[in-house]
Image (tube, helix red, strand yellow):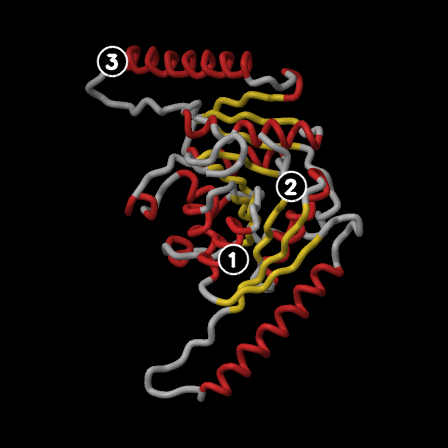
Amino acid sequence: MTALKRILCGTDLSPASGPAWEFAQRLALATRAELLLLHVVPVIPVSMEGGFDPRTYQRLMKDGRMEAVAACDRLVASVVDRSLRVAVRTEDGPAAARILAVADSEGADLVVLGTHGRTGLSRLLVGSVAEHVVQLASCPVVTVRPLPGLAGSAGRPLARIMYPTDFSPASRKAWPWVKALAEVTGADVDLLHVLLEVVPDRHVDPAFLARAAEAIREDAQKSGDQFLAICGFPRDRIHVHLAHGVEADQIAHLAQARGADLIVMGTHGRTGLLRLALGSVTRRVLHAAPRPVLTVGPGITSEGRA
């Protein structure tokens, strides 16, 4: 993987996006990448039954842009290290579309976005800006939930990276990012593989089920050993964990227990409407992870772009 040269951090200037700005600084400090802070000014909705005259509408949009620029300037002034190179850009239009377009036009190697941490039914609704960017971006995307433990973390180095994997080609695409970030930061790596479960069945001999479960564990251990032999990373800095249970739950649990600073995982790249289907492991992790999550889509190469 080539070194990170430019990190785009999208912000809606709400408190929920603050942790993403802090984490973007952590990554930029570790990699010496340039930071591009982007705010997309939302279009003011106009009712079909009446609304603003064109002059008033233009004035309101202009005021919104000026307020956004001032708020972005305050964020830039708050950086923890004055040696960071920071640029600011404001755009108008649909947020996800403009973030994707700017990431491409500016040659961003990584996009960092905050999520609003909704709970209940609203967290299952398709359409959030972060999810659209994760699904469609041509470079990896880091999503950062508004968690209390991330406040004031901008100056802290990355010490531990978690790498969930099922050893598939899709999950292996994330490894170059894990390796590169761990090498530049000196972080340790926790590799997690969640074992397939053997479902109890009263019509099946329990001894057979036990042998099947043991075979699954042995195969996973073998895959892990093969991976370690070719991963090109110091063996004493990578820790392998085999777990039982629901994948997303186990990822969140181990990230919390091990104090991971970042979760890095590949996505399986479904196409069409399936890309928007509820229930994927990646989507559940994005909504529940106690740490920032870096996702690498299937079309993204080890050089960083699709």
Residue 157, given in percent of the width and then of the height, sits at: 72, 38
Q: Earlier in the sequence, mark 3 or mark 2?
A: 2
Q: Residue at x 42, y 36 (%)?
A: 299
95 sits left or right of 290 in the view: left
Q: Nearer the viewer, residue 84 or 179?
A: 84
Q: Residue at x 57, y 36 (%)?
A: 255
Residue kind at label 1, given as amino acid type:
His
Q: Residues within 10 Å of mark 1 (few under 14, many from 20)?
A: some
Residue that badge 2 annotates: 5
| Corner quadrant of residue 10 | bottom right
Q: Is residue 22 above or below residue 270?
A: below
Residue kind at label 2, given as amino acid type:
Lys
Residue that badge 3 annotates: 205
Nearer to us of marks 3 and 1 is: 1
Residue that badge 1 annotates: 116
Q: Is residue 104 above or below residue 205?
A: below
CA gap, disc 1 and disc 2: 27 Å
Secondary structure of the residue carrying tag 1 is: loop
75 sits left or right of 92 in the view: right
Q: Earlier in the sequence, mark 3 or mark 1?
A: 1
300 sits left or right of 107 in the view: left
Q: Residue at x 57, y 78 (%)?
A: 62
